[in-house]
Image (spheres, helix red, strand yellow):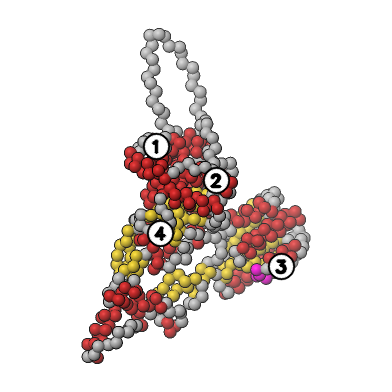
Amino acid sequence: MVATETISPWTDAEWAAALIALTGETLGGVHLRSPPGPVRDYWLKRVKQLSGQDPIRKIPANIPEGRLLGGIDLGATLQHGKPIAETGMLGECHGHIVIAAMAERLPRNTVHHLCTALDHGAITLARDGIEAETPARIALIATDEGTEDESAHAALIDRLGILLDMTTLGIHDVDDEIFRRRDVERAINALARVTISEEHLTALATLTASLGIDSPRPTLAAAKVARASAALRQSEVVKEEDVARALRLCLIPRAQQLPEMAEPPPEPEPEPEQTDDAEPPPMAEQPPPDEDRLLEAALAQLPAGLLEQLQTRSARLRQSSTGSAGDQHRHQNRGRPTGVFRGDHRRGGRVNILATLRAAAPWQPLRRQEQTERDNETPPRHLQIRRDDIHLTRFQQRRETLTLFVVDASGSAALQRLAEAKGAVELLLADCYVRRDQVALIAFRDEQAELLLPPTRSLVRAKKTLAALPGGGATPMAAALDLTRDMAERAGKQGTTMQYIILTDGAANVARDGTRNREAGTADALAAARMLALSPSNGLVIDTAQRPQPRARELADTLRGTYLALPQADAQTLNRAIRAATP
């Protein structure tokens, strides 16, 4: 057992600021999960102080691709009559720390360019008639303000050496400063002399695998952090405390699982007493680092409750995009501008004047020469725009999202479970309201399924309809699934992304023709489920029975959806499970 005291989250945050100031672009950067506020502002201020870089440039989430990468300098090109390149923001920030604001909302193309810069330390520009390679070695601080269902792109997080979560920190948690700029400068000079043993490297690699981390990048980052930690301690040898710090900052936040600790070996039998003539035992060498001991030390220093967030954080890291605000599709004139393309403006679309001028500028001398040879006179010095120069703006519009709740209000659903389902749906309604999703409610009981609430964004109306939902009667499952399929088809025609959540025990006993027969009702329900599975909607089945039933799981499998069994769950538990399972 390793005796270690709990380290406050701010202490690790202070170390992270010093480490990124020391290692810079060699570490990749920091994924900073924190809401806007004084704590995050103070931490960024500490990075400025320790790195000596003030101000730190910030990349906005909606930065145009041309500004990020660079391109043609329109004014200089028109003035000199030949293509003149303009350096983008990544090139301007070469050798510096950069902040990517709202990393959870970065477009995919921006994430791609940032990953390229982090991987190669340079970006290749091939656009607007210019081909060039620009140095772009940066250290990136990706500020992530997303909710539990949102996070930055997994590919970007994988390239950032340190993962720092300050969502639970308040201004009163901020402690005294540990480092000053001169400490970082001293560590920079000493870093090259710091050594890390093969045993420590092997321990880091073994722990990476046992934590369920597939990528090799976190192991390399942990080794760099361990060496930098030793340099900040003014030591030339990596100790276990440095490895434990690397575990907390680089590996444990990415863990997909917690490894089982090895059982302690049995106590050795007492050795026989040695005579005076016996040779003394050789001096024992320092034992190699034990992976379980290192992991135990790192875990013991974590604040209480942090390990409970492991699965939630790991699920966020596995996501490849942001939450469930709806798919995106292209539109000619509406939505968020995402780039430009060469096209025919006569077919619709908005002409991008700047991109069109950039495409035409390099050709002006040649076109004037052609016109002079053709007309035997000097042409006027005005821009000659041709059809191939026309560039249109590409827009991307987010689809509407519809969350459909299908609630079993029959007699087989006990009144207590129905009340819990109502409570969970009411909690989810608030989430849908925040995301501006539409919600709808289908209830089925007796001999029919009824759309009690058509798609709406009215939270008050949804709550009133839910509260008035009666219970009791037979279970017309097939009718409910048929109505759900109709809603999915209608949503698809309107360009809406739909997801449905079915709360039932799976006990169907009403056939499609209205007769009460359990076998016929089950067969019709599975047939309706097979038809619903062909729709593009995502499905989730919540088993509301007191004990998990195979019929509800069979229904979920037929729907090709997700199954959740929640015996004895209250509304809060049900709500958390649905949040974790829905896309």
Q: CA distance from mark 1 to mark 3?
A: 64 Å
Locate residue 358, reporting x and y percent.
35, 75
Looking at the image, is mark 3 or mark 4 nearer the viewer? 4
Look at the image and say whether residue 468 sits in the magenta stretch: no
- Residue under the image location 69 percent in, 51 percent down: 570
Q: Which residues are magenta?
A: 452-457
Mark 3 is on which residue type? Arg
- Residue where numbered disc 4 is placed: 114
- Residue 46 vs residue 104, the one in the foreground: 46
Q: CA distance from mark 2 to mark 1?
A: 24 Å
Which mark, residue 174? Answer: 2
Mark 4 is on which residue type? Leu
- Residue under the image location 47 percent in, 63 percent down: 61
Q: Secondary structure at mark 1?
A: loop
- Residue where numbered disc 3 is placed: 461
In the drawing, does residue 450 fall left or right of residue 275?
Answer: right
Looking at the image, is mark 2 or mark 4 nearer the viewer? 2
- Residue 247 vs residue 79, the one in the foreground: 79
In the drawing, does residue 111 fall left or right of residue 33?
Answer: left
The reply to whether discs 1 and 3 touch (Cβ–Cβ < 8 Å) is no
Q: Reading the chain from its start, which is encountered first: label 1 or label 3?
A: 1
In the drawing, does residue 307 fall left or right of residue 117?
Answer: right
Q: CA distance from mark 3 to mark 4?
A: 44 Å
